[in-house]
Amino acid sequence: MIKKPIQMIVNSYLIGDPLDLPTLVGDSKLNSTIINGFDMWQGDIGATKNFYMSIRNLKLDTTQISRGTRVHAMDWSVSQGTSLVNVHIEMPQDSEHVGITMSQGGSGIIISDCVSSREATLR
């Protein structure tokens, strides 16, 4: 259960078991993002200094958060040397939730084998 965002920093990797994906569930009171890839401590506000980060083999779940809350599973405002591989995002249907955003911009990323789905039943 994630109560506050996981802050990625330059040269960090978050890797789970590819055969049994660990699930990071956003707490019902979380109102921002589960994983924040934008490292604001890198100087200027642009995403171009956010590099050498990877997230692999994880499931992100926002279904415990109110459908009316504007929440992001991930802010991936990053650039060179970054990747998302085998990341699955579960969100409630008909919600304000966003799977992946790049609110600060970004470039040079690899995204492969990622899935985003909306739950068929409402909670």
Image: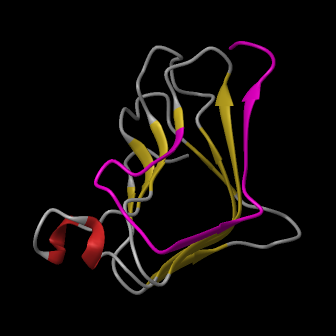
In the image, farthest residue toward the left: 44
In the image, farthest residue toward the right: 19
Assign the C terminus to one quadrant of the image: top right
The image quarter in which residue 89 lies: top right
| Residue 117 or residue 33, whichever sits in front | 117
In the rendered image, residue 62, in percent from the top left (x then y), is placed at 58, 35
Residue 57 located left or right of residue 60: right
Does the stretch in magenta take in 96? no
In the rendered image, residue 52, in percent from the top left (x then y), is placed at 43, 85
In the image, farthest residue toward the front: 107
Residue 50 located left or right of residue 120: left
Does the stretch in magenta take in 116? yes
The image quarter in which residue 61 lies: top right
Residue appearing at x 53%, y 17% in the figure:
67
Magenta-tinted stretch? 99-123
In the rendered image, residue 90, in percent from the top left (x then y), is placed at 69, 38
Asked if residue 59 is positioned above or below residue 96 in the image, the reply reads below
In the rendered image, residue 6, in percent from the top left (x then y), is placed at 41, 59
Q: How many marks?
A: 0
Residue appearing at x 78%, y 73% in the figure:
17
| Residue 25 or residue 10, whichever sits in front | 10
Asked if residue 53 is positioned above or below residue 122 in the image, the reply reads below
Snapshot colouring: secondary structure
| Residue 101 or residue 22, whichever sits in front | 101
The image quarter in which residue 30 lies: top left
Asked if residue 54 is positioned above or below residue 2 in the image, the reply reads below
Residue appearing at x 42%, y 21% in the figure:
69
